[in-house]
Image (spheres, rainbow, N blue to C red):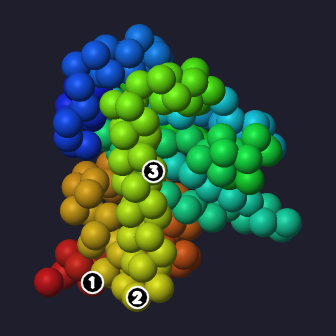
């Protein structure tokens, strides 16, 4: 479980007054497994911080095949940043893979406060840096690591992943088939 204070503390030096303003913007919300934070072609108005649970972002091609792009876990911000910034419909869907408790923050209200609160403006800047870092790491991992290495990295982040996330979601994230994932697991556990 993560508190908002713990979340903002990772970005350092957020004044108490700014944190209190941020706290006023955030509401704790519950989502059930398989519910969506945002669906395809919806315009995002909120972003979320995960208190408990796991969310995935994914796309679907013209043949209906799903491609999981990211898993979001404890303490990670989630939501369609592209849609928030552009005010355009989201190209990705954000689905809860488990029951989730999230902090929901209205993006426009947050941005309004950043204009008058330098502490929140700094938090926004650091939050964008953090999201950029996470996205760049994902791109690197997909380009450089093979499927076995990506799976091991994912297991370090979500140790009991096999019990939480459906195999086909994991395979879609690794960009391999479920059969290939079974082979990777078998090879890992036979060592």
Q: Is residue 185 left or right of residue 59?
A: left
Q: Which mark is in front, 2 or 3? A: 3
Mark 3 secondary-structure assignment? helix
Return the mark for residue 127: none
Q: Is residue 74 left or right of residue 44?
A: left
Q: Is residue 54 left or right of residue 38?
A: left
Mark 3 highlights which residue? 128
Q: Residues within 10 Å of mark 3 (few under 14, many from 20)?
A: some
- Marks 3 and 1, Cα distance to the nearest angstrom? 38 Å
Q: Which mark is in front, 2 or 1? A: 2
Mark 2 highlights which residue? 144
- Tell me which numbered mark, 2 or 1, is placed earlier along the sequence: 2
- Marks 2 and 3, Cα distance to the nearest angstrom? 24 Å
Q: Are marks 2 and 3 in contact (CB under 8 Å)?
A: no
Pinpoint residue 133: horizontal percent, then vertical percent: 38, 63
Q: Residues within 10 Å of mark 2 (few under 14, many from 20)?
A: few
Return the mark for residue 187: 1
Q: Are marks 3 and 1 in contact (CB under 8 Å)?
A: no
Pinpoint residue 113: horizontal percent, then vertical percent: 50, 22
């Amino acid at each position: 479980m993560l508190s908002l204070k713990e979340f903002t503390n990772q970005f350092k030096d957020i004044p108490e007054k700014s944190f209190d303003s941020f706290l006023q913007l955030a509401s704790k919300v519950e989502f059930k497994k398989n519910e969506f934070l945002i669906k395809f072609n919806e315009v995002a108005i909120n972003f979320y911080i995960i208190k408990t649970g796991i969310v995935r972002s994914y796309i679907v091609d013209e043949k209906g095949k799903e491609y999981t792009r990211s898993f979001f876990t404890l303490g990670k911000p989630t939501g369609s940043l592209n849609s928030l910034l552009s005010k355009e419909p989201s190209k990705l869907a954000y689905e809860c893979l488990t029951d989730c408790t999230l902090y929901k923050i209205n993006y426009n209200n947050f941005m309004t406060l950043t204009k008058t609160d330098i502490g929140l403006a700094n938090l926004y800047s650091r939050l964008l840096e953090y999201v950029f870092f996470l996205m760049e790491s994902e791109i690197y991992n997909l380009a450089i690591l093979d499927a076995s290495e990506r799976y091991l990295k994912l297991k370090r982040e979500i140790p009991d992943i096999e019990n939480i996330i459906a195999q086909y979601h994991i395979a879609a994230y690794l960009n391999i088939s479920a059969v290939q994932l079974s082979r990777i697991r078998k090879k890992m556990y036979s060592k």
